[in-house]
Image: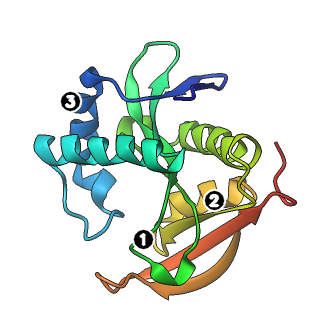
Amino acid sequence: MTEIRTPRLLLRGWHDDDLVPMADINADPRVMRWVDDGSVLDLDETAEAIERWEEEWDEEGFGLFAVELLASGELIGFTGLSLPWFLPEVMPAVALSWRLGPQFWGQGYASEAAHATLEFALQDRGLDRVISVNRVEDGASENVSRKLGMVPERETVHPAYGFPLRVHAIDLTEFEA
């Protein structure tokens, strides 16, 4: 699996010792507020999620990276690419997403990791276009999408939960590495 280094981060595959810190992130209601119906995930659900993320790497050639602080080796969350099957109207598409523990918010880590992942998608994996799907009220994720050069493409509603979503997109001709 690919590893990507940025000035402060290592984007890498998942290790066994990532389970507990990722489960702690997934168990925080502040983090999960913007994910699906807002339900937190326990240790077993996080283990199942990581297994799915690893399978996507095998099946698609991309997936969600574990994000580690270079300075400390601490897992701070994930960023990566996935197929947004939950939103059939945007398919076929590849979506960029991120999730960090709240103690790492507001420091530019999400933008740094997402930018490296976008570069990987467009240059290494040869994707022509990448989207992000954010809840309309999630201003922090909206800001990350804009910092990446993504532009709003459409608004829709989550088919299962009914809340408003905004889809941002960028293609290879618009990306600045």
Q: What residue type is labelled 1?
A: Trp
Percent coordinates x, y for residue 164 in the rendering? 44, 83
From the viewer's perspective, tell me whether residue 58 is left or right of residue 92. Answer: left
Percent coordinates x, y for residue 86 in the rendering? 39, 74
Q: Distance between the residues labelled 3 and 1?
A: 27 Å
Residue name at image x 16 percent, y 49 percent: 45
Label 2 crowding class (10 Å Cα cut-off): few <14, some 14-19, many 20+? Answer: many
Q: What residue type is labelled 3?
A: Val
Indicate the quadrant where residue 120 lies.
Answer: top right
Q: Above or below — where is 120 with respect to 155?
A: above
Q: How far apart are marks 2 and 3 (CA)?
A: 28 Å
Residue name at image x 48 percent, y 22 percent: 69
Residue under label 2, please give it. 145
Q: What element carries label 3?
A: helix
Q: What residue type is labelled 2?
A: Ser
Q: Please state which of residues 120 and 177 is positioned toward the viewer in this rendering.
A: 120
Residue under label 1, please give it. 85
Sequence-wise, which precedes: disc 2 or disc 3?
3
Residue under label 3, please give it. 20
The answer to whether residue 56 of the structure is visible from this angle is yes
Q: Please state which of residues 53 and 144 is positioned toward the viewer in this rendering.
A: 53
Disc 2, disc 3: CB below 8 Å?
A: no
Q: Above or below — where is 151 with respect to 51?
A: below
Q: What element carries label 1?
A: loop
From the viewer's perspective, tell me whether residue 28 is left or right of residue 147. Answer: left
Percent coordinates x, y for residue 42 in the rendering? 13, 46
Q: Above or below — where is 97 with respect to 85?
A: above
The answer to whether residue 105 of the structure is visible from this angle is no
Q: Above or below — where is 130 with respect to 157?
A: above
Residue found at the very far right of the displayed protein: 173
Sequence-wise, which precedes: disc 1 or disc 2?
1
Disc 3 or disc 1, which is closer to the eye?
Answer: 1
